[in-house]
Amino acid sequence: MALFLSSKLRKAANTSLLEEKKNKLLNDHDEYNAFEDSEELQNYIELEKEVNSEDFKQKRKQVEAKRFKGSELERKEKELNRILKSKRYRIYKSVAEGSDLSSYEAMRKSEELVKYIELQADVNSGKLNKKEDKESWLTYKELKKSSQIRAYFKFKHSSKLKIYSEVLNSNLLQEIEDLKTELASEEFLSEKNYLLDKKRFEKSEAYNRLINYKELSESESFKKYFRLKKKNDFHLVNEWKLTFSEDFEGDCLDKEKWITRYYWGDVLMNDAYALPNDPHIFSEDNIKISNSIARLETRKEIAQGKVWDPSIGFVPKEFDYTSALISTGKSFRQKYGLFEAKIKVSDIKNVMHSFWMLSDTSLPHIDIARTSSCGKLFPSQITGNENKPIVKKSKIDGLDWTKDFFIYSLEWAPNKLVWRINDVIVKTETENIPQEPMYLILSSGVSKPTADVNAVMEIDWVKCYEKA
């Protein structure tokens, strides 16, 4: 089991890569949420609903199914052509445009025709006698031989004139005129061109919306959105709500968040103190902030301070070492959640570096991460009471904790504690789970007081979450 865990830790040892993946997930999550609330996506959803609807598909089919052939427009064109090519209309047109009609009309109004008609009437009635009315008779004979009069009566009794007159007195000419006017209208020609256009759907507003939908679907922003939606791993983000965050910006420690000594020393006497076995005293001077990193320094140097003596209380003492501690005892406490920090340490043979949690009393006590001189890491839980503590401690080996930053975390649920290093589970406890809010402490302290110490605990960030 230890070998398997060591192998998993070595595979997860690249903290930068792990953090890069986490940050990418967070950035993707923010981008996804922003895009999900965007007007652009809402427009796309409406377009998608529209272009995939049966109504849209039916309308497209109707547009693409339209043809000039067989349409009412073609029927009217054919009707006009049929009329114009009909025998009756051709005869009418030949008469209307020919010379016979004009000659006929001219003769119909002439004096010669009037005289001839009068004389012929007298002849037919017997009034005119060639012996007694010789002169009138000769006039009649002469007019009867007239080629113009003969042509007049021939045309008058012709079928051409009959058809011409019938057409002239019918509705046919008006029908032709109406059809010609309609077929020459802008509306008719536009509709005809539309029906003859095989790409008429491509020129429609519906097609523009379809293309808009397809272009949006192919755009990188939409592809990424749907890729993230399909992947659906934002539960890793949505599961937790950030409650505390420290990135150590600026050049000094944020005193609104952190105190630099044990909580009870700060509360009771506004001063630092050491525990009976501590060879060091915590000093605010040992805390440096630069480049978004908090450095808790431990070094060999003489310093004055106080130590807690259970029999007589706080007493002055000279220390050979100084170190540093930061705590959220006065600013932040939480029951249950996820607590993590990105930390790098040095000189673990002589200095113990700890990321731990306490409540108002010394127990329960949780070490999220604690180094030891043997090179192992000790995640642990101490419960019970001071007279009879219950210690649940594990030993984690397989990595050099001084080589790089690692993310140490504790997930605390009502019935379980889970320790992780770079997201690899290294310890789980299901008994004696603390049920009171606890605060965070990050500290370093001398474990071998005979050594010449110059160590540092570097903290990149600290974050706490609660279940969303």
Image (tube, grey):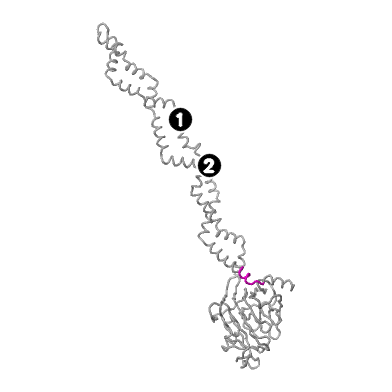
Against 219, is 342 above or below? below
- Residue 369 lies, in percent from the top left, at 66, 78
Residue for point 71% across, 71% down: 7
How many other residues sit within 10 Å of disc 2, few (<14), some (14-19) or many (≥20)? Answer: few
The amino acid at mark 1 is Arg
Name the disc covering residue 65, or none.
2
Magenta residues, start to end: 13-21
Q: Nearer the viewer, residue 151 or 86?
A: 151
- Quadrant position of residue 258: bottom right
The tally of labels here is: 2
Relative image position of residue 150 (x, y in whole percent): 34, 16
Q: Residue furthest top?
A: 131
Q: Looking at the picture, how far across and down is residue 100, in whole percent?
A: 35, 22
Quadrant assignment for the N terminus: bottom right
| Residue 108 coordinates in the image, percent (x, y) | 30, 20
Front-most of residues 235 and 148: 148
179 relative to 139 in the view: left or right: right
Q: In which quarter of the view is residue 404 placed?
A: bottom right
Image disc number at residue 82:
1
| Disc 2 and disc 1 in contact, CB within 8 angstroms | no
Q: Nearer the viewer, residue 255 or 238?
A: 255
In the drawing, does residue 285 fall left or right of residue 2? left
Q: Specify the principal SS of the magenta part.
A: helix
* Vertical placement of residue 449 versus 12, above or below: below
Q: Residues within 10 Å of mark 1 (few under 14, many from 20)?
A: few
Q: Quadrant of residue 145?
A: top left
Three-letter amino acid code at disc 2? Ala
